[in-house]
Amino acid sequence: MSTHTTRFKAVIFDLDGVITDTARYHYLAWKRLADGIDTPFDEAFNEELKGIHRMGSLELILARAPRAFDADEKLALADAKNRHYQELVATMTPKDLLPGALEALEQVRAAGLRIGLASVSKNAFTVLDRLGIRDRFDDVVDAATVRRGKPDPEIFLTAAAHLGVAPADCLGVEDAAAGVASIKDAGMFAVGVGDPQVLARADRIIRSMEEFDLFAY
Ligand code: BG6
Ligand code: MG
């Protein structure tokens, strides 16, 4: 039962797959790249890439490729993937907010909590602008400043520090196993959005952001 009180002082959201379905665009862009180099790629393998930064994801894909790629080739592949991804992002509008995402941001704001964004995507600011929600966050961690991506806790700890809130008083929201690990290792409460088997380390699982209820955690 909701009591309309919360012990948290901040909520830190992931972006891709939580606020909007860009996880799908990342999948489509990696899929085309993998097909182009005769490398197996499916939804199950893609699950392992969620939350992983661009070059790390590419390395995981290339580990299954039929040949080796040198550093210049890798950069060219990553650039090609990113250009395709950016073409997909360029079609986005505020209608691409996932159901329940805006309501969740509004609920957290109305409760007087701080709001952060912890995405390792270097396209996060562009995506927020396409969705028209950049100003709804008190802090957006710039992925370019994060040295260790998810599952390392650095990005969630950075968001908490920027917000001036102790990690133990933060709730993190993630759709990826690597992201849930990042939240938990930061010492925060984790809400996982998606498959309970994939997100087993989360403190709570919801199937979609429509189920997000700050007062239930
Ligand atoms: C994460 C996605 O949010 O950002 C990953 O879950 C993606 O799939 C990563 O690889 C990096 O994104 P970008 O936009 O910097 O290539
Ligand atoms: Mg995500």
Image (cartoon, helix red, strand yellow):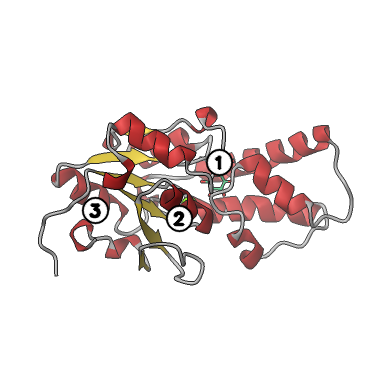
Q: Distance between the Cα atoms at labels 1 and 2?
A: 12 Å
Residue that carries the numbered disc 1 in the rendered image: 149
Give residue 180's mark. Answer: 2
Q: Amino acid type of disc 1? A: Gly
Callout 2 secondary element: helix
Ligand 1 near label 1 (Cβ, under 8 Å)?
A: yes
Callout 1 secondary element: loop
Ligand 2 near label 3 (Cβ, under 8 Å)?
A: no
Asked whether 129 or 173 is in front, the reply is: 173
Q: Is residue 127 visible?
A: no
Residue depth check, mark 2 versus mark 3: number of the one nearer the observer: 2
- How many neighbours does mark 2 have within 10 angstroms: few (below 14), some (14-19), or many (20 or more)? many
Q: Is residue 155 above or below residue 207?
A: above
Q: Amino acid type of disc 3? A: Glu
Please state, as top left, top right, bottom left or bottom right, where the C terminus lies in the image.
bottom left
Q: Amino acid type of disc 2? A: Val
Q: Residue at x 50, y 57 (%)?
A: 176
Residue 19 location (% of width, % of height): 38, 50
- How many neighbours does mark 1 have within 10 angstroms: few (below 14), some (14-19), or many (20 or more)? many
Residue 196 location (% of width, % of height): 44, 71
Q: Residue at x 58, y 50 (%)?
A: 26
On screen, residue 3 versus residue 76, left or right, reads: left
Give residue 77's mark. Answer: none
